Image (cartoon, grey):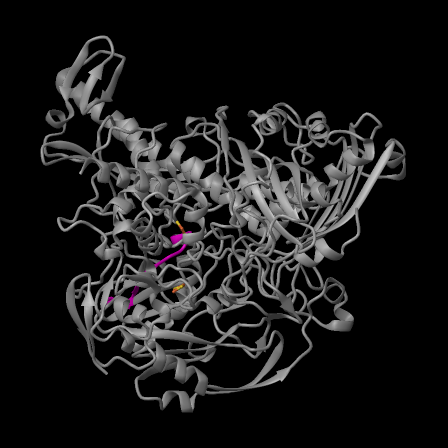
Amino acid sequence: MSTRTIQGQKNLQNINQASKDGIGGSPLRPDGNLKVKGEFAYSSDMWHEDMLWGMALRSPHPRANILSVDISEALKVPGVYAVLTHEDIPGSKYYGLEIQDQPALAIDKIRYHGEAIALVAADHPETARRAVKKIKVEYEVLTPIVTEEQCLDPETYGYVHEPHEYKSHAYGNICHEQKLVSGLGVTDEVRAMADVIVSGDYEVGMQDQAFLGPESGLAVPAEDGGIDLYIATQWLHVDREQMAPVLDLPEEKVRLTLAGVGGAFGGREDISMQIHACLLAQHTGKPVKIVYSRDESFYGHVHRHPARMHYEHGATRDGKLVFADCRIVLDGGAYASASPAVVGNAASLGHGPYVIPNVKMHAIALYSNNPSCGAMRGFGAVQAAFGYESQMDKLAAELGMDPVELRQLNAMSEGDFMPTGQRIDSPAPVAELLRRAKEMPLPPPLDTEHLDVRALPGALSNTSHGEGIVRGVGYSVGIKNVGFSEGFDDYSTARVRLEVIGGEPVAMVHTAMAEVGQGGVTVHAQIARTELGVEQVTIHPANTEVGSAGSTSASRQTYMTGGAVKLAAEAVRRALIEKGRRRYGWTHQDITLSGGKVVSESAGVLVPMVDLLGDEAIDLTREHHHRPTQAFDKETGQGFGHVQYTFCANRAVVDVDVELGLVKVVELTAVQDVGKALNPLSVVGQIQGGCTQALGLAVMEEIIVRDGKVRNASFTDYLIPTILDTPPIPVDVLELPDPHAPYGLRGVGEAPTVSATPSIVAAIRNATGLALNRIPVRPEHLTTEQPG
Amino acid sequence: MRVTFTANGKPVEADDVWEGESLLYVLRERVGLPGSKNACEQGECGSCTVYLDGVPVCSCLVAAGQVQDREVRTVEGLAEENGELGLVQQAFVDAGAVQCGFCTPGLLVQTDALLERDAQPSDNDIREALSGNLCRCTGYEKIMDAVRLASARKCAGEAST
Ligand code: FES
Ligand code: FES
């Protein structure tokens, strides 16, 4: 088996990029040429000469007892090699990111619509589909537990999981809970200190990551009894950690290699088809490929938590915030996934980037029979931002103040304290970001003389010719943490090798970082070039042969794995210079590497690196840990919980057709502090992409779940912004270095997704005068809702 | 059944094709051209766009049998003969319009077709032409830049020849 070829393992190997661009430059992606030629091998492109196709049978019910499963007819279909149920699992039957509460295949119970019950391996996807249809399952269908009221009354409606079945199961159907109190909390006395109080109930629908590359991968059984998996994921090592016990293999026999990833946005942080493909490969002894269809993708990964929130803010007559009282209820769905961490973020970031002397917060995640929710770009901070930013606009209106001025008046800055008691010890230019967003030139007014209907709300549908259109402008700002929080020992590993190849010094960077499209591979090469003074850098394919890189999420990869590459490259540089000192007896204190040479700033070129290296390679591995954080106190929410904060401000300009209820975002400006832009082109691309997902949440994206059933599992019915829906996104980037971060950088990818949604809703409110307390804003809200 | 057609100028044939198979499946799984992508297989995302007899189509919506004796051109066929990137491909790389790149093959074919029809499209023309191609990563700004860049290079190239 080991002699056979697996197509698609050359995505990054041997790509030598001859570019002088180090950090701060914008060299092109090392994988860009392959991608535009159609030669880059994504996980769904993996191919093996005698591979089988795997497929899952999924439950049509959100809650049921499984009375029996009969696979006999399915096994008779010609071309079928295996049909498996939970009984065929060799090891542990459960897995999970934080709580091991999810069965790899349903056992006796169904907890959500689309839960996998059985697996088929067959010689053609159509054979597998037909066999799946022949599996007979007898269900006792139960009434699903789906609303907040039902979840919170288990005596009446029942439990999604039996009480205290899992370790951090808080109580009843509450998966996780975090409270926070700061200052005097919110008491009658504190309320009395405010001249004005505004309150509101806000709701956020269930958003999907909707990455384009479907969940897919190829599992190949190996001769040593282990398994090789080629997979699109966000974190190779955490997948392996969850997989090995289920497959009943030691971790070193579960080898993962990153296959090309077609976007992730949090949706690949959990296991999807990894275990299923490996189980089928174990049972058949053959390579098995699984590729989700789009509807299966909607069932097969976790989504953004829908939220119901109550906010109350009090302020003095001149606009100073006095208190904030908030309750955030997140629907976590059937399994925990990342819910505990999402709750921690919502609670600790749920007041926004504002100084508020007295705060009370209660955030919970529920277990329900709705689809599971977990990580998505913005992670708990997105939902809250819609709440607190809506409140800021409401408060400004109540006080007769300009909404930007009100925000600036209360904006936090360096040296201020978070409601968690954590002092902000790096720049926090919140007021400045808002100022810049406001001062950017506005787009020209709608040109009614030379109307191009394609630029109007409704666009190509030719629904109107400009009558009934009103324009509005809205602002927002948000806060997001970077990296893993609450005491998690977040780290990344990098191996850097320096050697002479073809008469030139070449650096190789090897990490387990999942490149999901964000451009980490480009930045790693830039860092190696900068630290080692070489031009040629090779990126080794990401796999589990090197230590964990942690997840490509939480805006952490450039900070964490970039930091590890920097450490390893610095160690290689020191080793090389030391070698020179030993050989040549240099005494200079100012030796560095530049242009392929060892140089002294005072004495000039000492020796070409090629001569010093000879045929020896320097190959070193380093780990980068960020400074330790603390768990939040359960009751008070106090603690140094987050390692870094990042801020983005937005201005949205919208045209609303008030007769048709259609919105066209005309422009969406973003101003963000990135600490240091290691690759400005990628930074701007990340910010624009983040803004567009926020636009989707504001006006169109929602998984519709009724009675626990998903009603729109397709791109026909779940709408993501097209190029017609997306406006120009001018980006202004600030670079105020964070003294605690490598190169002073700040995580970039999530902040705009947190902040941009409320600006769009604010602009629609500005245009229409409607209250709009629920996102996504739908046409019916615009045509029937009452003014706010 | 057996299906024979021309892919990127070369004759190809696929055996044992099941009647329900799409052109996309045949290209990706049978004839070794996985460049066209499978993001929805429902005609909604444009990732699978290829030329069929010179017209851009969603290959996931074309039954394999329909391409018998016809000409298909995929993203793999957009490069120059010597393997260098084609004009539209180069513009996408240069403008930073490629992130995860899953949407890219479809966008390249659709952009190529647009610039063949109209070498100097307005922004609204570009948006209209690419409105059937979803991209989840870029926010489309860099894609607009790439098309404008390709258009400018194409016009400059035409002016100089
Ligand atoms: S895969 Fe064909 S349009 Fe989406
Ligand atoms: S670059 Fe990822 S979908 Fe477009």
- The image position of residue A539, as x and y in percent, is 26, 42
Which span of residues is magenta-colored? A220-236
On the rendered image, what quadrant is the N terminus of chain A found in? Answer: bottom left
- The image position of residue A787, as x and y in percent, is 79, 48
Q: Is residue A551 visible?
A: no
Q: Nearer the viewer, residue A282 or A143?
A: A143
- The image position of residue A726, as x and y in percent, is 51, 47
Give the residue displayed 61% in from the left and 45% down from the top: A757
User: Please, which residue is most extreme toward the top here?
Assistant: A602
A122 w.r.t. A616: above or below? below
Q: Is residue A12 visible?
A: yes
Give the residue displayed 71% in from the left and 64% down from the top: A172
Q: Nearer the viewer, residue A550 or B50?
A: B50
Question: Quarter of the image holding residue A420?
Answer: top right
The number of callouts visible is 0
A59 w.r.t. A418: above or below? below
- The image position of residue B156, as x and y in percent, is 25, 36
Question: Quarter of the image holding residue A503?
Answer: top left
Question: Quarter of the image holding residue B37?
Answer: bottom left
Q: Nearer the viewer, residue B148 or A408?
A: B148
The quadrant where ligand 1 appears is: bottom left
